[in-house]
């Protein structure tokens, strides 16, 4: 009997050893939110629960990983700043260098999660999994989605199959590449989609299943190194509409923007009212990237607008906010439109 107990203890401890080591970095958002009633899905307060409480709320996590948590920020994600991006990315890079860390999970608000995810996808220097997770309902709600999302995220971050797939977002059972993901609905739980590229994978009954690999370069293949960067160049967004004007572009340039992403109607068009301001801006060295106002679509070089003539850059298949992220990083190296244009078809 005693021998049986001893053998079971050895098996149990070797199983514990076999569990992956996952670090959870918390930044706030609805997953750390609290409402005044169990039926409040909106109007609750985001970013109030600390990382320890988040982990304690899901005791099942202990069965799938050796976990530790750190609070990197505590904000709703509309308040995420480029300073937080840099702090977070540097922490992820230093954790993933350690042999005793197998993966990182980042809890984050859903509003700007796709931007943080894409930023990390371009600057994390590791093949180890980095998984971002959030929730559409606060922890106090009936059917809060945070606990299951967190469980799935830890499972994904600890899985061998997730190695080398870049930064991923896990919500609502799905795994989506940072490059491809878009929040498509401001309220519903089934909001994160990859409309052009499709999902990377899915979590079913505690099993992580991948359908494909991301195609664009990311993480360990990326040319961007933020280890010495303390500030990112300012890049703003201009929105195209019928009978628009160059007023906003002129003001952005005058106030020091180094780059502008123009979300143009249709295939990222630029109207005759806007083009003179665009030309003035690019002549001053301000980089201008064209993305579709529709949020989906392929924008090729010299398609709809003569990029060579105006010195503008086509955004490829990147959404407007993600084009801004890539442009900021590109501008840390050069404002040469040829160099910047190449980035938009690589990443
Ligand atoms: N306001 C929240 C945030 O992005 C919404 C969310 O977390 O989903 O932080």
Image (spheres, rainbow, N blue to C red):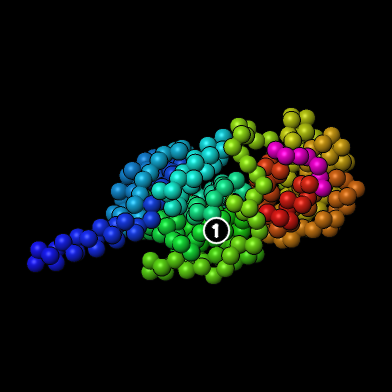
Between 128 and 152, which is closer to the camera in this rendering? 128
Q: Residue at x 51, y 59 (%)?
A: 163
- Residue 73: % across, % down: 46, 37
Q: Quadrant of residue 193?
A: bottom right
Residue, far front: 3
Q: Quadrant of residue 63?
A: bottom left
- Residue 260: % across, % down: 74, 41
Question: In which quadrant will I find the N terminus?
Answer: bottom left
Q: Which residue is mark 1?
A: 164
Residue 56 falls left or right of residue 79: left
Residue 244 falls left or right of residue 322: right
- In the structure shown, which secondary structural element does the residue marked by tag 1 occupy? loop
Question: In which quadrant will I find the C terminus?
Answer: bottom right
Q: Is residue 79 visible?
A: no
The range drawn in magenta is 332-338
In the rendered view, tell whether residue 5 sits above or below residue 27.
Answer: below
The overriding secondary structure of the stretch rendered in magenta is loop
Q: Is residue 12 visible?
A: yes
């Amino acid at each position: 009997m005693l021998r049986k107990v001893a053998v079971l203890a050895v098996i149990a401890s070797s199983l514990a050893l076999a569990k992956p080591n996952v670090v959870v970095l918390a930044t706030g958002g609805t997953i750390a939110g609290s409402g005044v009633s169990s039926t409040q899905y909106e109007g609750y307060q985001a970013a109030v629960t600390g990382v320890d409480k988040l982990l304690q709320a899901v005791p099942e996590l202990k069965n799938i990983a050796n976990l530790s948590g750190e609070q990197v920020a505590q904000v709703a994600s509309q308040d995420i700043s480029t300073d937080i991006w840099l702090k977070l990315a540097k922490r992820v890079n230093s954790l993933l260098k350690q042999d005793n860390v197998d993966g990182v999970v980042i809890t984050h608000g859903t509003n700007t999660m796709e931007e943080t995810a894409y930023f990390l996808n371009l600057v994390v220097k590791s093949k180890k999994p980095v998984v971002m997770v959030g929730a559409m309902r606060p922890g106090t709600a009936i059917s809060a989605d945070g606990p299951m999302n967190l469980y799935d995220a830890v499972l994904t971050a600890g899985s061998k199959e997730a190695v080398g797939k870049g930064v991923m977002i896990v919500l609502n059972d799905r795994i989506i590449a940072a490059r491809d993901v878009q929040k498509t609905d401001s309220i519903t739980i089934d909001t994160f989609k990859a409309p052009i590229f499709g999902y990377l994978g899915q979590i079913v009954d505690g099993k992580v299943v991948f359908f494909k690999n991301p195609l664009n370069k990311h993480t360990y293949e990326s040319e961007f190194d933020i280890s010495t960067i303390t500030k990112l160049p300012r890049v703003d967004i201009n929105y195209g509409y019928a009978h628009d004007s160059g007023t906003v572009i002129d003001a952005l340039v005058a106030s020091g923007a180094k780059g502008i992403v123009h979300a143009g109607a249709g295939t990222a068009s630029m109207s005759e009212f806007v083009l003179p301001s665009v030309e003035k801006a690019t002549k001053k060295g301000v980089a201008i990237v064209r993305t579709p106002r529709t949020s989906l679509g392929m924008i090729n070089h010299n398609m709809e607008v003569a990029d060579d003539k105006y010195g503008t850059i086509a955004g490829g298949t990147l959404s407007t906010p993600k084009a801004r992220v890539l442009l900021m990083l590109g501008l840390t190296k050069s404002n040469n439109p040829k160099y910047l244009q190449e980035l938009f078809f690589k990443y």
